[in-house]
Structures are given as C-alpha cells and as structure tokens.
Image (cartoon, rainbow, N blue to C red):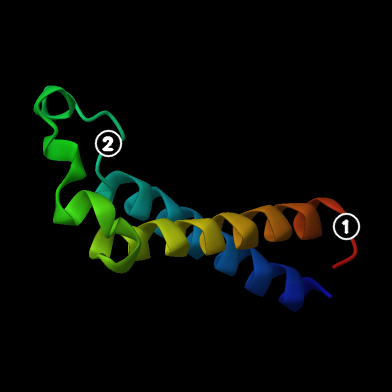
Amino acid sequence: MGVVRIIVSILYIIVSVALVVLVLMQEGKAQGLGSISGAAESYWGKNKGRSMEGMLVKITKVLAFFFLALTILLNMNII
C-alpha cells in the first residue's frame, strides 16, 4: 500500500504544479478600456473557445477535477 500512496502523491504534486502554471498562463478576465470602444467583441473575443485561451481554460478545468479527486483520495486513507 505504501508504494501506491507514493505514486499518487507524486502525481498529486505534478498536477498541482501544472495547475499553477496553467492558471498563470491565462489572460485576465478584466477587459479594461477595450470594453468601452467595443474592442472586446473582436474575432478573438467571439471565438475564445476555439483559441489557445479556450484550450487553456478546458485543460485547467480537467486538472482542477483531478486535483480535487486526488485530494479526496489521499485524505481518505484508503491507500
């Protein structure tokens, strides 16, 4: 059982670091002065789900789920 806990702990650390890096890579949600002139409704603003930013958001959600699942798994003392 100790080997499985070590493997899950290492996986937990990797997911944690990846989650921090992905959050720091994302742009802020504040549109600043661009929203006054309507620049927020540009091509990139409308198609954010298909862009690199949209992919980062999706990956962040998946990693957040794995982070939560691993946190619960490690705290249940099953392994």
Q: Give the numbered dot on residue 28.
A: 2
Q: Residue at x 88, y 57 (%)?
A: 77
Pointer 1: what residue? 77
Q: Quadrant of residue 27?
A: top left
- Please, is residue 11 above or below residue 42 in the view? below
Q: Position of residue 37 (x, y in %)?
A: 9, 27
Q: Position of residue 45 (x, y in %)?
A: 23, 49
Q: Quadrant of residue 30?
A: top left
Q: Give the numbered dot on residue 30.
A: none
Helix, strand or loop under label 1: loop
| Foreground disc of the pair 1, 2 | 2
Q: Position of residue 72 (x, y in %)?
A: 78, 53
In the displayed structure image, the side of residue 68 where residue 35 appears, left or right: left
Q: Which quarter of the image is occupied by the C terminus?
A: bottom right
Q: Which quarter of the image is occupied by the N terminus?
A: bottom right
Q: How many marks?
A: 2
- Please, is residue 40 above or below residue 32 in the view? below
Q: Residue 30 or 17: which is nearer the viewer?
A: 30
Q: Residue at x 88, y 54 (%)?
A: 76
In the displayed structure image, the side of residue 75 where residue 19 appears, left or right: left
Task: Mark 1 or mark 2: name the one nearer the start of the chain.
Answer: 2
